[in-house]
Amino acid sequence: MQALLDAVVDLVALVSPAKASIVASTLRGLSSSGSAPNPNTLADTAAARAALGRVVAAWGQAQASGDEVAGMLLGASEARLRVERELRVELVWTGPTTRFVPTRRTDQVLLDLIASATKDVFLVSFVAYDVPSVVAALNDAASRGVRIRILLEASTSHGGTLNYDPAAKMRSRVATAELFTWKEKPEPFVEGKVHAKVVVVDGARAFITSANLTGHALEKNMEAGVLMSGGHVPQALADHLQALIGIGILDRV
């Protein structure tokens, strides 16, 4: 029976829920695997046909009816849908690409995230400059009533490490944004820097990336990140940033 369960899971991972439902409907009411239709008539790709063939072969070794196999397919398909609704992780890459991994560019993901925001955007970066498209997207979001908060490294005159003030520059470009720096740095964080690069939107999507908010990072550097949609991580990250503000670690400037 375990071999049959494994084969069902493998098939459901390859085909759409709609296709899994069609296969289940075809198998329902059959008394044995000998009555199963040819995989070539049900599956659209070679991999799916092979996976369906393994389901039929494993069914032949198990004491199960067609109704039971159909139930396994529907149950596994529903489990897959629930996982996808709860959490989806996508690789984001800027730089040379290959045919092995489909990716989206950092700038595309960042702009899409900001455009999708309905309540709030919290953006964290070491520095921010030479990003007119991002500035335009943030201002457009603000005009829709979206709350914009940005955490950046501070200048040396404000306890940071930079010889210019990125928060002041960003304020001049996104006037409605709430700007923050890391002011309180108790041991062991003395001389620490804001080195995180994070975007959280509506507590529902989080983008964690190696890219700073600069033109080179978004368009020319080799940068990697992950976009998480759903699940508990985006809200947990939003809560964490809000708590750092609440306890005075992050200071509004």
Image (tube, rainbow, N blue to C red):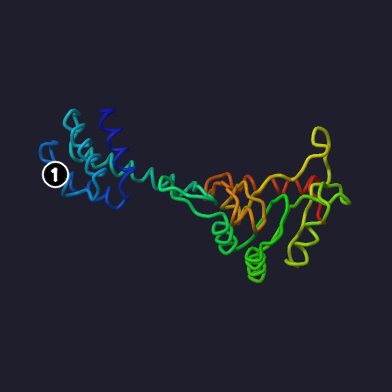
Q: Residue furthest bottom?
A: 143
Question: Count of labels shown?
Answer: 1
Q: Quadrant of the N terminus?
A: top left
Q: Quadrant of the C terminus?
A: bottom right
Mark 1 is surrounded, within 10 Å at the Cα level, by few (under 14), some (14 to 19) or many (20 or more) other residues, namely: few
Q: Residue 36 in the image: x percent, y percent? A: 14, 41
Q: Residue visible at 78% across and 62% down? A: 169
Q: Is residue 190 left or right of residue 43?
A: right
Q: Is residue 179 left or right of residue 158?
A: left
Q: Residue visible at 59% across and 54% down? A: 220
Q: Residue furthest left?
A: 35
Q: Is residue 167 left or right of residue 13?
A: right
Q: Is residue 232 left or right of residue 166?
A: left
Please tell me whether residue 191 is drawn above or below residue 26 in the rendered image. above
Q: Residue 162 in the image: x percent, y percent? A: 81, 50
Q: Residue 12 occupies which quadrant of the picture?
A: top left
Q: Residue visible at 44% across and 44% down? A: 83
Q: Residue visible at 49% across and 46% down? A: 89
Q: Residue 157 in the image: x percent, y percent? A: 89, 51
Element assignment for label 1? loop
Q: Residue 77 in the image: x percent, y percent? A: 33, 45
Q: Residue furthest right?
A: 157
Q: Residue 168 occupies which quadrant of the picture?
A: bottom right
The one of 148 and 124 positioned closer to us in this rendering: 124
The residue beneath circle 1 is 38
Please tell me whether residue 111 is drawn above or below residue 52 in the rendered image. below
The one of 39 and 109 positioned closer to us in this rendering: 109
The amino acid pointed to by label 1 is Asn
Q: Residue 65 occupies which quadrant of the picture?
A: top left
The one of 203 and 39 positioned closer to us in this rendering: 39
